[in-house]
Image (cartoon, rainbow, N blue to C red):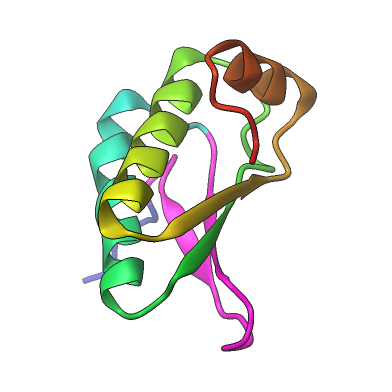
């Protein structure tokens, strides 16, 4: 039995071992998606990854769920002793993250 992929969840891009892992957040992201995002990030760090790039290109709507997701992902990374960089945030998402004190890097 197969199921459709959930909205707002992530995929992990295969990367060169010398490059950081890439966590792709698909849209729309909801508050209910945040625990799974953090679980996936913890699994990456638990697997030996030291740096993760969080790709927000799909998030075209700037809202509090996006801010919550980035805030919790940064906290999860800090607690795991890893590094998290955010890339490809649209102008609205980037402005809201900056306003919330969660700048892109």
Residue under the image location 42 percent in, 75 percent down: 49
Is 8 a magenta residue? yes
User: 70 above or below 91?
Assistant: below
Residue under the image location 53 percent in, 14 percent down: 100
8 left or right of 16?
left
Q: Position of residue 53 (x, y in %)?
A: 58, 58
Q: Quadrant of the C terminus?
A: top right
User: 1 above or below 76?
Assistant: below
Q: Position of residue 86 (x, y in %)?
A: 61, 45
Q: Position of residue 42 (x, y in %)?
A: 27, 60
Q: Quadrant of residue 104?
A: top right
Residues in magenta? Answer: 6-27
Q: Quadrant of residue 20?
A: bottom right
Residue at the extreme bottom of the image, as rendered:
17
Q: Position of residue 13 (x, y in %)?
A: 56, 71
Is 36 a magenta residue? no
Residue under the image location 39 percent in, 24 percent down: 68
21 left or right of 3?
right
Question: Of 99 and 32, which appears nearest the observer?
Answer: 99
Question: Of 86 and 66, which appears nearest the observer?
Answer: 86
User: 70 above or below 76?
Assistant: above
Q: Quadrant of the N terminus?
A: bottom left
User: 91 above or below 85?
Assistant: above
Residue under the image location 35 percent in, 69 percent down: 44
């Amino acid at each position: 039995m197969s199921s459709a992929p959930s909205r707002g969840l992530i995929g992990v891009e295969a990367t060169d071992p010398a490059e950081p892992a890439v966590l792709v957040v698909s849209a729309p992201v909801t508050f209910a998606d945040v625990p799974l995002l953090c679980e996936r990030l913890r699994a990456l760090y638990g697997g030996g990854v030291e740096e993760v790039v969080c790709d927000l290109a799909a998030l075209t709507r700037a809202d509090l769920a996006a801010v919550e997701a980035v805030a919790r992902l940064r906290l999860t990374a800090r607690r795991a002793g890893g590094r998290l960089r955010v890339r490809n945030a649209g102008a609205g998402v980037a402005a809201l993250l900056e306003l919330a004190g969660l700048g892109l890097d």
